[in-house]
Image (cartoon, rainbow, N blue to C red):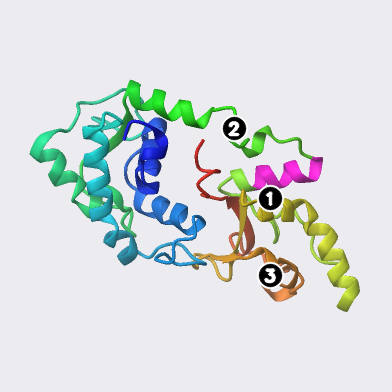
Amino acid sequence: METWDDLTLTEQVLVRRAVAGVSPRGSAQHVTAVLRWAGSPEVPRRRSASLAEQSARVPELAVATLRLVAGGWLTLRRVLSTRFVQEDGPEVTGAELEQLVADTATWVWPWDGRSGAPVLSLRATDEGRRRWEARAYAPEAPPVIHQLDLTEDEDRVRVCAMELSGWLTGPFGILADLPSGLEGEELRAYVAAELAPLVRFVREGTIEVLHVAEPDAEATVVPSEDLLDAFSDRELRCDDRDDWGVGFTCTLTQSPANALR
């Protein structure tokens, strides 16, 4: 496992997170998203993984981490003060490493946001970073979205997808409310033109559209073939509601190519 292509998708996710130097928490959800975009039949198709589904992925993450540590790709380290600190803390090794990677609290954010588990960080080794860069920045590697030549409208969609608070519809959305007088085919023609900058990214697999029906409700993925019908539905858009966090939003996908960098 000396090159990027020798790694499983789960291992690739962990290396990419280690390059960024982030907490291992959230990795179970991240891996599920990448597997979904890779077409795995074992993951939910139109939603995020539940807590139980994330927990069930922990043994896979544990095995992958131990393999990557043994292969010189990454280390698991303690962060002594806060998970936002960038300095490397002491490396976790041996029996303690085996115990921590087998612990669900290492990989899954608790719903209540509280946990007494030690704060940890995934860190790429110098060799691991070199191997990742050899693949991520190879001449044939696909460009990331900010490297594309975008129109002004496409760039607004890109920014919306990159921001955690970005919304497509509703009082804070980048799309205007539907005109009140449009119905039928006139309405669909209006929506088709409105969605054109977004559809390109969805079809290319770089952005996915999510619908949230109620505040704090679980988001569902809207496939590209359903976008026109969905955005033509005034009730689904929630244009006339004051609530932040309902309607349609979008995010960068975790497709294997898009998640590489």
User: Which residue is at a point 70% across and 60% down the rendered structure image?
Assistant: 169
156 within the magenta span: yes
What is the spatial separation of the Cα atoms under label 1 and label 3, in whole angstroms? 15 Å
Q: Position of residue 106 (x, y in %)?
A: 25, 47
**Where, by quadrant of the figure, is residue 248 drawn?**
bottom right
Q: Which residue is mark 1?
A: 201
252 within the magenta span: no
Q: Position of residue 2 (x, y in %)?
A: 33, 31
Callout 1: helix, strand or loop? helix
Q: Position of residue 157 (x, y in %)?
A: 71, 47
Callout 3: helix, strand or loop? helix
User: Which residue is at a point 8% across and 40% down the rendered structure image?
Assistant: 95
Q: Which residue is mark 3?
A: 226
Instruction: Give the mark nearest the N terminus, 1 or 3.
Output: 1
Instruction: Give the mark nearest the N terminus, 1 or 2.
Output: 2
Residues rendered magenta in the picture: 151-160
Residue sitting nearer the eye, 110 or 194 = 194
**Where, by quadrant of the figure, is residue 202 drawn?**
bottom right
Query: What amino acid is at disc 1?
Result: Phe
Query: What amino acid is at disc 3?
Result: Asp
